[in-house]
Image (tube, rainbow, N blue to C red):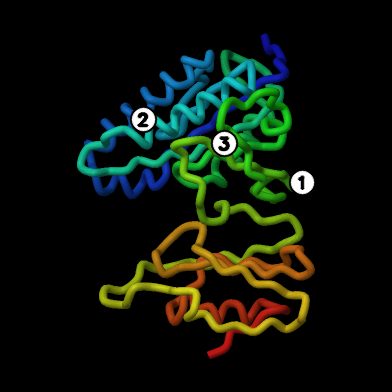
Amino acid sequence: MSEREAGLTFLFTDVEGSTRLLRDLGTTYGLLIRIHRRILQTACAERAGREMGNEGDAEFFVFRHAEDAVAAAVSAQQKLERYAWPDGIRLRVRMGLHCGSATVSGGEYVGLAVHEVARICAAAHGGQVICSSAVADGMDDPGDDVRFSDLGSYRLRDIPDPWTLYQLCAPGLEEHFPPLRGAVREGGSLVTVWRREPRPGSGPGWQAQQFPFRCLAEDVDVEVGRASDGGAGAFRVVVRRRGTVEEEYDGLTVGGPTDAATVVNAHSRLLRIEG
């Protein structure tokens, strides 16, 4: 028999770069996953969180109160960061938090909110905790030194409406990350290109001063930063007009197979790459 529950907070986690870690570590990877799972389970159990399932290196927890879910996420990230992983490995976990209702069927939570928290988690980077506005706005007391940094409004995969997303900030948590993964700012469009690993001896990679461009209108601003994922030489270009994101280009390189001039000049109405 199914029963609907409201006012829940969901925590979804996933290990960053798990395929690469498995390839590089072999059987040691299984040990790392067991350790990481125990850290998560302990942090969540301390705040009355229930583990509702896991698949591969992904974990799913449910809390009655948003304050407990936030505290558990902070504690888990702090413990993961401090843990002395074998062989000098730095295991990084992305996390997503969201509040909503779900139906309990056969001992499992089913509902749109469950899919939504998975999409929020997928947008994060390892070491990062991303929250929906339902979490950030619903917090009466987030705790000492805990705050929510407004990242802006984004469209997530398979979710039609834009969402305002927040990064959970607290002592011991990294605060500076590349743009969200696979998420498009509201009003913008995203052109994602494939990257190849840099060739041996190909140089130190891209630097900002090596990227010459020309705006085609006076009200256009350009932001250049690290790519959301990929090689050290890859970068991302965000083009705004009157403060609104009009174009985004992720994974560009200078002189490589995804050369910025070739990609941007073929798609952009507001920007030209020169030189």
What amino acid type is highlighted by mark number 2? His
How far is disc 3 from disc 2 in space, using C-alphas? 16 Å
Task: Mark yes or no: residue 119 visible.
Answer: no
Task: Mark yes or no: residue 36 visible.
Answer: yes
Which one is in front in this view, the residue at disc 2 or the one at disc 1? 2
Q: Against 166, is 32 above or below?
A: above
Q: Farthest residue toward the bottom?
A: 275
In the picture, the disc for residue 96 is 3
In the picture, the disc for residue 36 is 2
Q: Mark 2 and 1 residues: CB-CB less than 8 Å, in contact?
A: no
Q: What residue is disc 1 on?
A: 161
Q: Farthest residue toward the front?
A: 144
**Which label's residue is closer to the chain start, 1 or 3?**
3
**Which label's residue is closer to the chain start, 2 or 1?**
2
Q: Mark 1 and 3 residues: CB-CB less than 8 Å, in contact?
A: no
Please state if 86 lies on the left or on the right of 124 as rendered: left
Q: Residue at x 48, y 66 (%)?
A: 194
Q: Against 186, is 148 above or below?
A: above
Q: Against 252, is 17 above or below?
A: above
Compare residues 148 and 72 and report the one nearer the observer.
148
How far is disc 1 from disc 3 in space, using C-alphas? 18 Å
**Which label's residue is closer to the chain start, 3 or 2?**
2
Picture quadrant of residue 248: bottom right
What amino acid type is highlighted by mark number 1? Asp
- Judged from the image, the secondary structure of the residue bearing numbered disc 3 is strand
What amino acid type is highlighted by mark number 3? Gly
- Judged from the image, the secondary structure of the residue bearing numbered disc 2 is helix
